[in-house]
Image (cartoon, grey):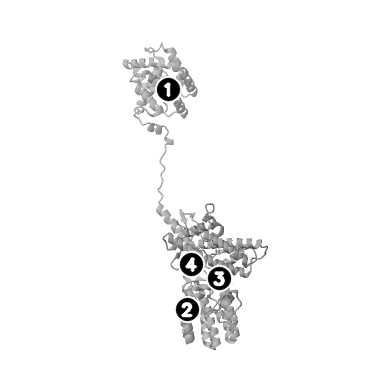
Amino acid sequence: MALSTTVSQKKLIKRKAPRGFLKRVFKQRKPHLRLETNSDLLVHLNCLLFVHRLAEEARTNACENKCGVIKKEHVLAAAKVILKKSRG
Amino acid sequence: MADSYSRDSEPTTRTLLRRVLDTADPRTPRRPRSARTDVQRALLQTPSSRRLRSQTKTTARRCSNRARSVDRLARVQASGHLEEQTPRTLLKNILLTAPESSILMPESVVKPVLAPQVVQASRRESSRGSLELQLPELEPPTTLAPGLLALGRRKQRLRLSVFQQGVDLGLPPSQEPHGNADASSLTSSLNLTFATPLQTQSVKRPGLARRPPTRRAVDVGTFLQDLRDTSLALAPPDTVLEDTQPFSQPLVGRSPSVHHSLPCCSHSGAKDVERAASRRTWSSGLGLQNNSAGKAAQLLAGNVEEVDALAMGFPNISSNIFGEDGVEPLQNGVGEEAEERMEESLREVEKAAEAQGSARAEELEGHIEVTKAEGSWGAVEAKEPEGSSGDGDTSGRIASPELASSTPEFLRARRLQFLEPAPPPSSAVLPSEPPEPLSARLPPKPRIPGSRPRQDPYKTGLNHYAKLFNFYAKMPMEKKAVEMVEKCLDKYFQHLCDDLEVFAAHAGRKTVRPEDLELLMRRQGLVSDQVSLHVLVERHLPLEYRQQLIPCAFSGNTVFPAQ
């Protein structure tokens, strides 16, 4: 192998993926399934993109209401749209 | 002049014979044709001179017509000559058969030979042919200048045309083989020569002869082996680096001390034993993965026990416990949490008992400082002090012994920043708990083994993404909005797991693989024909993850990750 699969101490990854958390969540909900190593990272990527879209939508809602702060309602409305979109 | 020049340049028997022939009075019907032949001869005579060659070329073109007629006559005469078998003819034949340097240079050979010939045209062709036929028998060809060769080739081509005309006219059989051999020198199509052309060529240019380069076949096997060895040599340093983590060694060292401390606990008292036993069972039931320092847990457990003991009024026990703490090596720590807990416990200790407390506090402080020094563990722990653990301190603590068992996993998954709030055990016992948002969030429900850890780390995980939401939004957010985000994330995870299950089942698998994820993203509209998955990986994930996901070629003809 050219690269080691683990990261050495010196490399401090910013914005690390909570792999354990994701794996645990998946295991708890679907105990009969297994999650592969690299798909773990892709799930994290998916979450990032979801959150990104949600944030964009919420920001748009807040700006439309000419509000400087994101409020619950904005988030709720945004979530409705984005969850429907990311149903797959 | 040309003759003399030619003679001087090549003082061979051939030239001598030539001279003889020239000077001698030929009986052959040379004279009548002397005008034409002389012209041709003069044209042809000058050897090794480009001027001559060019002239001959031009003359050849001009005299092509003449040559045809001359050829006919020459052939007739040549045949006549051969039949006569006079000394003259013999000498001529010798001259004809005189060795030429090479087939490539028939011109140079031909030139001097042809000059004195009675029938130049016939001589030319015949000489070429005969010379070539008899090349191997005669002397080694003389090395000729490359210019001659080149010129010879050029002339050859011209003469070939002439020759071909002669062939068309109908050469006598004696001439034809010569002609054929001659032609073969030009085009290697009709090859009647017996000598190997290559041989002459090589003999002609010994210095330029190409030898097959002596190559040693590369031993691919050993080469790869060497690569592997070097890679292996490289790998250990990484692992060594990882192993030299302050966390790892203490953890390793802790495991014995964990066991060590457990018996010590048993020694301390029945109560402690019960508590420890209950905790152990509890912890085993919990099955927590995150390691966060078994040692820290131990220490905290010790602290809690100590606090309890103090509360109960058993200084001996506490001292024993503290002794354990002292024995325990440095804590890697859960990091800030452990420190906070220890600080809290420290405060409690100080409040509780002065004399003992001071001594222990110093120890604790020492421990805390050590942990602080070591625990540059993860920023996530900062979130966790939420303790969220209002009740579950003990359970969290109990998780510690089993965290010790899970240390190897910890070593492997070092990236896990999401450590359980295993450490904060003392906070539960501590009456005063720092106000944490999560603690307020947690409903004061009765402890059910299995449900609490599900909620707590789950919340912390969601909090991780909620903070990302905060970052992406670039606007201030209310607390309620953050909670709202967490709810949405919860729903999202549900959908995600369901979809992945469906996709994996569709593929007949029980393991979710990256292909399923790609399909999911494609369905979500994140991945399209314009935007590929790799692009998204590059954009949003850090480099280390990108290296793991996207196959890349490395040295040694390897691709990582292997496809």
Task: Give me the disc on residue B282.
Answer: 2
Q: What is the CA distance from the residue labelled 2 to the residue labelled 3?
A: 22 Å
Q: CA distance from mark 1 to mark 4?
A: 89 Å
Q: Pointer 1: residues within 10 angstroms few (<14), some, or many (20+)? A: some
Q: Is residue B256 above or below residue B268?
A: above
- Quarter of the image where one finds residue B488: bottom right
Question: Mark number for residue B72?
Answer: none
Same chain for mark 2 and mark 1? The answer is yes
The one nearer the camera, A69 or B431, is: A69
Q: Which mark is residue B460?
A: 3
Cα separation between marks 4 and 3:
15 Å
Mark 3 element type: helix
x then y, percent, for residue B540: 56, 59
User: Circle 1 is placed at which residue position?
Assistant: B161
- At label 4, the amino acid type is Phe
Disc 4 crowd rating (10 Å Cα; few below 14, some 14-19, many 20+) is many
B471 or B429: nearer the viewer: B471
Label 1 in the same subunit as label 3: yes
